[in-house]
Each structure stands twice: as structure tokens, then as C-alpha cells.
Amino acid sequence: MTLKFEPVPPIDTIRALRARGGALDPTFSWLDQWQQDHAAMFTVAKSAGYDILGDIFAALEQALSEGKTFRDFARELTPLLQAKGWWGRQLVTDPQTGDLVPARLGSARRLRTIFDTNMRVSYAAGHWASFERNKPRRPWLRYVALLDDATRRSHRARHNLVLPVDDPYWDHWAPPCGWNCRCTLQNLSDRDVDRLKREGERLVFDPPPLDFRPFVNKRTGEVTQVPDGIDPGWDYNPGKAGWRAVMDAAEAKIGSSEI
């Protein structure tokens, strides 16, 4: 008899994406929603004024649930976006100023950014749910960077950093730490830590210092301090924020059922 194993959908990851889908918020600029706000809502820059946000979210949810690739996602979504006029370079109205400004709407490159960013953030939230569940047995997190020519120097410097799950350092430095960041977190038991040491991994238990630089949000004028090495807008823990959004949604659902 031949055993056939079907792939199991990433339930925690799907829940994290769906928690954000409960609030679709069309925006003009990625600066209009900031950091943790993205954990509780779903938005796409330059989507304001176009009825396409629900379509993009549905395509992402289907891709995640069915294990579809970016090629599948883009092939099925592109004709719909083009039919609704959200494609190419156009003049659009900035709702904040009323001015017409040139903007890049849909494109293959933008769809790639939308797909990759939302998948990485959703998977980070799914992983964090696992970290919280397994914390008593696997109390450590290890920062893992891909060590190739495309890796940022600051991200490479944190490869093999090992800290407790609850360490506040992860509130700043938890992947993804910027656009196109490919770093991940791996949870470890005490035995895992000992094994990696025996195998010659140079684990680091003292994190690099957090040096900050000012960043001015051109849309709001707000000045925030962003850690060096992290892209503006990513100075938070996407996984933990997404996990908390799922927990909040579950608590709200229980509360409404008790009324």
C-alpha cells in the first residue's frame, strides 16, 4: 500500500492574514498606515479610489490556503486589476492635498512586492503563534539570515543571535525587518542550543546595540526614531503584532457571542 500525504495548510498563518482582512483600508501612500497598524488591517498603497483591495486580499488568501505560487497569483489577478483600471503609470489624486500626481499603480513588480510582503508578514505571525505555544519547551529564538551577497550587512551581523522569546530586543529586531528582508526566526530548546554549539555554530547571546536614527514621515510630519539597519515602517515585531491581532479578534468574537 502506498501512503499519500496531502500538504497541510499553515493554519496559524492563514488566521493571521484573515485577521487583517477584517479591516480593508484603501490608502494613498504606505506612509498613511504605520507599523503595528498593518497587523490589524489590510492595505495597499495607491488603492484609494479603486475597488481592488478586496480582490487583492482574496487572491492572497487563496494563494496561501492552496499553496499557490506568485506566478499563479499574478496570472489570475492581473486581468482583473487591468479591467478595473488599476494598472500602469497614471495621474491620481492625492486625497490629502487634492493634487494630481503621477503614480505607479499595478505592475508585475508591485504585485511581487505585495505578494512577498504579505506572505512574509503572515508567516511571521503564524510562527509567533507557535513560539508562544511552545515557549515552555523551546524558550529561545535564533535569528537566521541568508548569508549571500543580497543580505544587508546589519542583518548579517545578527545571524545566530540567540535570545529568550520574551526578550524586548525582538520588539525591534524581528524579521521581516524591511522590504525584501528574507531573515527568519527559529525557536530552540536548551538541547537545540547545546547541539548547535557542538556542531560549531557561533551562537551570540549578547545582541548588537540598538542605534537609532530620525525618520520624518512626509505625509504626517511625525518624526520617529528608527533603529539603524531597519527600514522605516518596520521597527516593530510583525510576527508578535500579527499574533496579537488574531488573539484580539478571537476575544472580540467570544465577547460578542456572550452578549
Image (cartoon, rainbow, N blue to C red):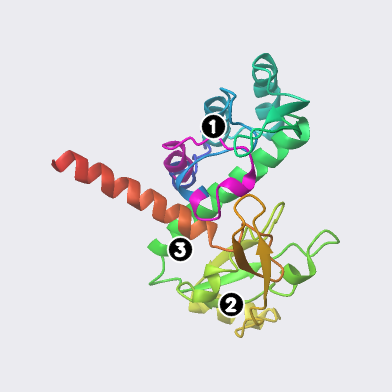
| Viewer-closest of 43 and 241 | 43
Disc 1 target residue: 57
Q: Amino acid at mark 3?
A: Phe
Q: SS class of the residue under badge 1?
A: helix
Quadrant of residue 74 within the rendered picture: top right
- Where residue 254 appears, as percent x and y from the top left, is 22, 45
Disc 3 target residue: 131
Query: Real-space Cα distance between discs 2 and 1?
Result: 35 Å
Q: Taking the image as drawn, is residue 119 in sight?
A: no
Asked if the magenta segment contains residue 145, the reply would be: no
Label 1 packing within 10 angstroms: few (<14), some (14-19), many (20+): many
Q: SS class of the residue under badge 2?
A: strand
Label 2 packing within 10 angstroms: few (<14), some (14-19), many (20+): many
Marks 2 and 1 close (CB-CB < 8 Å): no
Which numbered disc, 2 or 1, marks the residue that appears first in the sequence?
Answer: 1
Query: Real-space Cα distance between discs 3 and 2?
Result: 14 Å
Magenta-colored span: 16-37
Disc number placed over residue 162 in the picture, else none: 2
Q: Amino acid at mark 2?
A: Val
Which of the two discs, 1 and 3, sits closer to the camera? 1
Quadrant of residue 259 within the rendered picture: top left
Residue furthest right in the image: 149
Please state if 192 lies on the left or on the right of 109 as rendered. left
Please state if 16 lies on the left or on the right of 196 as rendered. left
- Where residue 3 appears, as percent x and y from the top left, is 51, 36
Q: SS class of the residue under badge 3?
A: helix
Residue for point 33% across, 51% down: 248
Which numbered disc, 1 or 3, marks the residue that appears first in the sequence?
Answer: 1
Question: Against 140, is 23 above or below?
Answer: above
Disc number placed over residue 200 in the picture, else none: none
Which of the two discs, 2 and 1, sits closer to the camera? 1
